[in-house]
Image: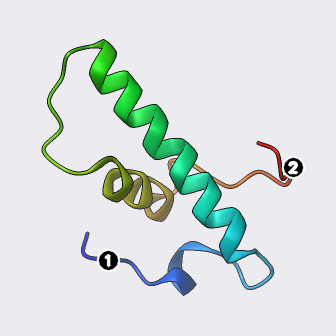
Amino acid sequence: MLRPAMSQIIKKDDSYYRFVVAVAKRAREIAEEAEEEKIPLEEKPVKLAVEEFAAGKYKMTSHPDL
């Protein structure tokens, strides 16, 4: 998937800031999981996280701290 548009990932009422925070948290999880399992990543964790959100594997929560 090549750079999905923000309008394709987040809903009209969602916050860009919340999306960025959610992607950063998921990217951190991806990097930590890869490090624990000693798996080299071919793509950057942020790109993988954005792709997961675009594919619908992960969704933003309504709670701002999650």
Q: Is residue 62 left or right of residue 41?
A: right
Residue at image point 27% right, 13% down: 37
| Vertical comparison of 44 with 12: above or below | above
Q: Residue furthest top?
A: 37
Dot 2 surroundings within 10 Å: few (below 14), some, or many (20 or more)? few
Assign a secondary structure to mark 2. Answer: loop
N-term mark: 1 or 2: 1
Cα–Cα gap, marks 1 and 2: 26 Å
Identify the amino acid type marked 2. Answer: His
Q: Is residue 11 left or right of residue 48?
A: right
Residue at image point 38% right, 55% down: 46
Q: In this figure, which residue is indicated by the disc labeled 2?
A: 63
Residue 3 position in % (x across, y down): 32, 77
33 vs 61, nearest the viewer: 33
How many numbered marks, from 0 up? Answer: 2
Identify the amino acid type marked 1. Answer: Arg
Residue 42 position in % (x across, y down): 12, 44
Q: Give the label on residue 3, or none.
A: 1
State the quadrant of the N terminus: bottom left
